[in-house]
Amino acid sequence: MEKRNSDDQNRKKPNVIVFFTDQQRADSTGVHGNPLDLTPNFDWIARTGTWFSQAATCQPVCAPARSSVQTGLYPTETGVWRNRKHLRPDQKTLAAYFNDAGYATAYIGKWHLAGVRTGRDDWNQEPVPRDLQGGYQYWLGAELPEFTSDEYHPRLFDRDGSPVNLPGYRSDAYVDAAIRYIDAQEKNHPEQPFMLFLSIFEPHQQNHIDTFPAPNGYAERYAGRWTPPDLAGSSEAAAKLGGYWGAVKRVDEGLGRLLDAIKSLRISDETIVFYAADHGCHFKTRNNEYKRSCHESSVRIPCAAVGPGFDRCGQRPELFSVIDIFPTLLDAAGLSLPEGLQGRSVIPHLSGAPAADTGPETDRAREYSAGYPSDCPFEEQFIQISEDKVSRALRTRRWKYAVTAFELDGNEVPAASEYVEEFLYDMDADPWEQQNLIGLPYAERISAALRERLRQRILEVECAEVTIIPAPVQAAADQGQRTLLD
């Protein structure tokens, strides 16, 4: 990074707000083609700021993905490769680096990085102890809000472990708490920049009832109105999509109130608002729950940012990952990046970027095979998958390739020495991943190239040499599909 001049050094660093949702599909947003007008505020950020239209998670499970956001490392490196694991108390997080730079740091909402202290069946409904709060100076959080509250009785805990019952619908209550924090910070310490991580629980399901409880009247408003093609014919999705869309709508309304608050405090021009999710949701169409699969519905997320360094950068073709959030936020705030990060800052690639068309994605040619800068390193995403299975995946501009160690329990081990090919999708021709090409003779050339690249990525990230066994050759179901690979 270039050295700042004296005027820059005297200028207040930008405030940073991370607006982080749980289990939100990319296509719940308007810019990704949802026709229900659920997310006008997210869409505004995408259109006026920077829209990472190809963003995806690096692990489609709550705790592992969150560990990567907080550290810039892959889950196998953080030690949080599945739920019920915790970050080490000495692990430097986003908060630690912003603390060192003189920021006030705050965390509000779901944490899910304190693990389990007294046994596998104890979901840690007790307060997160101070040594596992990630170094945040202000704390109003809960390890698993789905087990400490429901949608109209939100409960969090303060830094000392005292319960705090909040009024209102849960996502509203979290946003209200964030606005109160920002207002107090600006009144009492206007000269000090702040970094606030706001972790919204919605639209994740309420576990004990296995449904998506939206605010009163919202599920009814959206039930039966639009079903993404990958969920067509799913009775599970048909029964629950109304609540899911309703929860997304209310979350976006909260985002709008937060944007209004920083505008009314006259700090919009000096505040970065970075929106992302930990993973998506496939409504039990790919396995027996909602995520933990390599498919787009599980891994692809909404992601956009506005504010200093992000304004008017438009739609970006980079294959951005949640592991890249850590270095990108540090870089955007002008902080030095520590050595050893596995995520990459996208900031150098945004400098001087022209605004792009940010209409609905479905109305434009996809970016997987055209319009990609030749000098950009963000050409693939490496994805680790645990719990449901031990699996690895590679997502490129056009292809999705995944392998699995079928004989291993993903709850017991984080990785394997041998994998078998399981999935290959051509996302240009089959964006909803309905036709698995793995093992088809005309796809072997593609599989072979991706097989070697995935082996290299595993070696780079996990320092492990692995064997990937090619899938058995199958008879082509439709020889006409051969042209898709030309």
Image: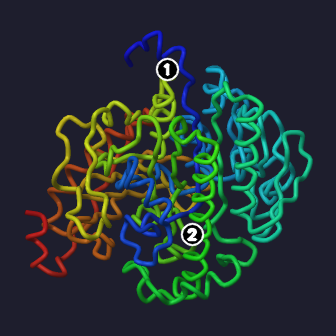
Element under label 2?
helix
Of residue 125 and residue 353, the one placed in the foreground of this image is 353
Q: What's under tag 2, amino acid-wise?
A: Val
- Relative height, residue 327 to residue 53 (above, below): above
Within 10 Å of disc 1 (Cα), the crowding (few <14, some 14-19, many 20+) is few
In the rendered structure, find residue 408 and report the number of the disc placed on it.
none
Element under label 1?
loop
146 with respect to 218 (left or right):
right
Q: Position of residue 282 (x, y in %)?
A: 49, 72
- Relative height, residue 103 to residue 454 (above, below): above
Residue labelled with disc 2 = 248
Q: Position of residue 464 (x, y in %)?
A: 42, 36
Residue labelled with disc 1 = 336
Q: Residue furthest top?
A: 6
129 with respect to 381 (left or right):
right
For the C terminus, give its image quadrant.
bottom left
At 47% from the left and 47% from the top, the residue drawn is 416
Q: Quick check: can you spot residue 73?
A: no
Q: Position of residue 369 (x, y in %)?
A: 17, 55
- Relative height, residue 93 to residue 482 (above, below): above
Q: What's under tag 1, amino acid-wise?
A: Ser
Of residue 460 and residue 342, the one placed in the foreground of this image is 342
Of residue 161 and residue 349, the one placed in the foreground of this image is 349
